[in-house]
Amino acid sequence: MSNNFNADNATISIIIPVYNEEETIAEQLRYLSGCSHHFPTEIIVIDGGSSDETVSKVKEEGFTCHSSPEKGRSVQMNTGASFASGSILYFVHADSRPPKSFQQDIRNCIRQGCDSGCYRFAFDSGHPLLKLNSYFTRFNRLMCRGGDQTLFITRSFFKALGGFREDYKIMEDFEFIRRVQDSGSFIIIPKNTVVSARKYSDNSYLKVNVVNLIVFMMYYLGASQKTMLHAYKNLIVNTKFG
């Protein structure tokens, strides 16, 4: 699916789904807005019912924090897209920091005819095994993808795909990217988004990777959302899943 608009003048709508992100959201908003001074941009924060100071932190930074009808990244991201006015949607997690050049990178990709894409990632940790994880995100394989890498997509393509499946409470990014790759052009930008390693600190490198592999295989083999979510919530400490 090819785009038919001028990427240089297009507004990028940055959509950030949040849930109890009081420690990260203010700095993230400052960073993203600081990278966007010279470009038409809007930043949309969608809260999934935070019980901490996330909403007030967003307001203190001068942004509106919209409420999602329910918790869950798929619902929150679709809700954010419904508020967006930009012709390019950019989904970013609160603890993922894209390169400072993300505005120009995305516009270049759109200009070249790409409908959607993401970055590779690197963790904010020097742990050698985490560097190994990061290395594999350069490959165009579904197993190497994930929402932490951020995702840009033209608004028209997002609408044509019907957005994220809201019945997906886990693996929603994988399901969506699979549809993206089946229907349009997808690119992996050869730069890194910096991702928080907090999940690995709260658990362990081995545990997180084993659980990720288990859940991915469950998804690949057609396990139900309920089964996958139950497995993940019972194996990973401090998960954001409800």
Image: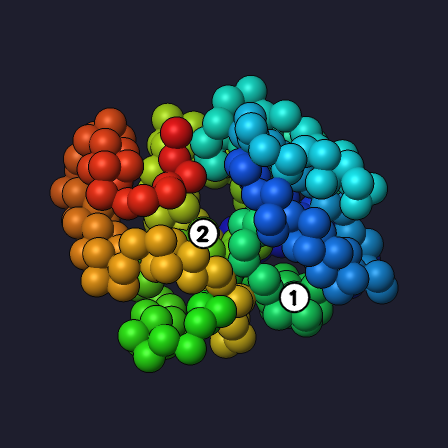
**Which quarter of the figure has residue 239?**
top left
Residue at figure coordinates x 85%, y 64% from the top left:
38
Percent from the top left, x then y, of residue 60? 79, 40
Residue bearing the label numbered 2: 147
Residue at figure coordinates x 23%, y 37% from the top left:
234
Disc marking residue 102: 1
Residue at figure coordinates x 49%, y 69% from the top left:
124
Instruction: Give the amino acid type for the residue marked by disc 1 in the picture.
Output: Phe
Relative height, residue 142 to residue 154 (above, below) = below
Q: Is residue 100 visible?
A: yes
Calculate the distance from the C-alpha at mark 1 to the C-alpha at mark 2: 16 Å
- The quarter in which the C terminus is drawn is top left
Percent from the top left, x then y, of residue 152? 57, 54
**Which quarter of the figure has residue 136?**
bottom left
Instruction: Give the amino acid type for the residue marked by disc 2 in the picture.
Output: Gly
Q: Indicate left or right for 182 with 118 as reference.
A: left
